[in-house]
Image (tube, rainbow, N blue to C red):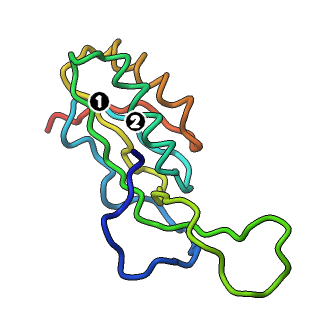
């Protein structure tokens, strides 16, 4: 089951613009390793779920995966071959808005080498460029 909000105030949202870098959610907090977005974009709920499945199949219960993004933006579309007018389309899918610097996933309980291999599999499913990051010890 793909991620989506339980309820929202408004079913249809405007597209908006993604400006600047992430100021929140840009550090590894829960796990030891993470992947960080280098581009801005939308990540669909189905893509987040595909990444979760790919990572969990690799770690097989020996590590814990944390998903740091949530799809709370509804994206609408009108049916194909529909004439102009007649209003905004119906919600088609849910997406998470990601800025450069946002941590997407975190992993704990595995070695650095295992985390790199796991996140390499996960990165191939992401629509944005990502990089491997470690938790800062401070």
Circle 1 SS class:
strand
Name the quarter where the C terminus is drawn.
Answer: top left
Task: Count how many numbered circles sit on residues in the image.
Answer: 2
Pick whichever, 98 or 8, lies toward us: 8
Q: Residue at x 31, y 47 (%)?
A: 68
Q: Residue at x 40, y 29 (%)?
A: 53
- Image quadrant in which you'd find residue 109: top left
Q: Position of residue 110 (x, y in %)?
A: 23, 17
Image position of 121 with respect to 106: above or below: above
Q: Residue at x 20, y 43 (%)?
A: 29
| Residue at the disc numbered 2 | 35
Circle 2 SS class:
strand
Q: Position of residue 19 (x, y in %)?
A: 53, 68
Image side of residue 78 versus residue 1, left or right: right
Q: Position of residue 1 (x, y in %)?
A: 39, 45
Image side of residue 54 versus residue 28, left or right: right
| Residue at the disc numbered 1 | 33
- Badge 2 local density, few (<14 within 10 Å), some, or many (20+)? many
- Image quadrant in which you'd find residue 111: top left
Image position of 62 with respect to 34: above or below: above
- Image quadrant in which you'd find residue 114: top left
Pick whichever, 138 or 82, lies toward us: 82
Task: Name the disc covering residue 59, or none.
Answer: none
Q: CA distance from mark 2 to mark 1?
A: 7 Å
- Badge 1 local density, few (<14 within 10 Å), some, or many (20+)? many
Toward the left, the furthest residue is 138
Q: Residue at x 51, y 42 (%)?
A: 47
Disc 2 vs disc 1: Cβ atoms closer than 8 Å? no
Q: Position of residue 104 (x, y in %)?
A: 39, 44
Image position of 36 with respect to 95: above or below: above
């Amino acid at each position: 089951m793909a991620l989506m909000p339980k309820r929202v105030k408004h079913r249809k949202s405007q597209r908006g613009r993604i400006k600047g870098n992430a100021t929140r959610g840009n550090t590894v907090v829960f796990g030891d390793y993470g992947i960080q977005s280098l581009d801005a974009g939308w990540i669909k709920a189905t893509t987040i779920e595909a990444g979760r499945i790919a990572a969990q199949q690799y770690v097989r219960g020996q590590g814990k995966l944390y998903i740091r993004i949530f799809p709370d933006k509804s994206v609408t579309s009108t049916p194909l071959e529909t004439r102009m007018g007649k209003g905004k389309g119906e919600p088609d899918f849910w997406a998470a808005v990601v800025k450069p610097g946002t941590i997407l996933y975190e992993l704990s309980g595995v070695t650095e080498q295992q985390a790199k291999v796991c996140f390499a599999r996960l990165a191939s499913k992401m629509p944005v460029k990502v990089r491997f990051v470690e938790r800062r010890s401070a």
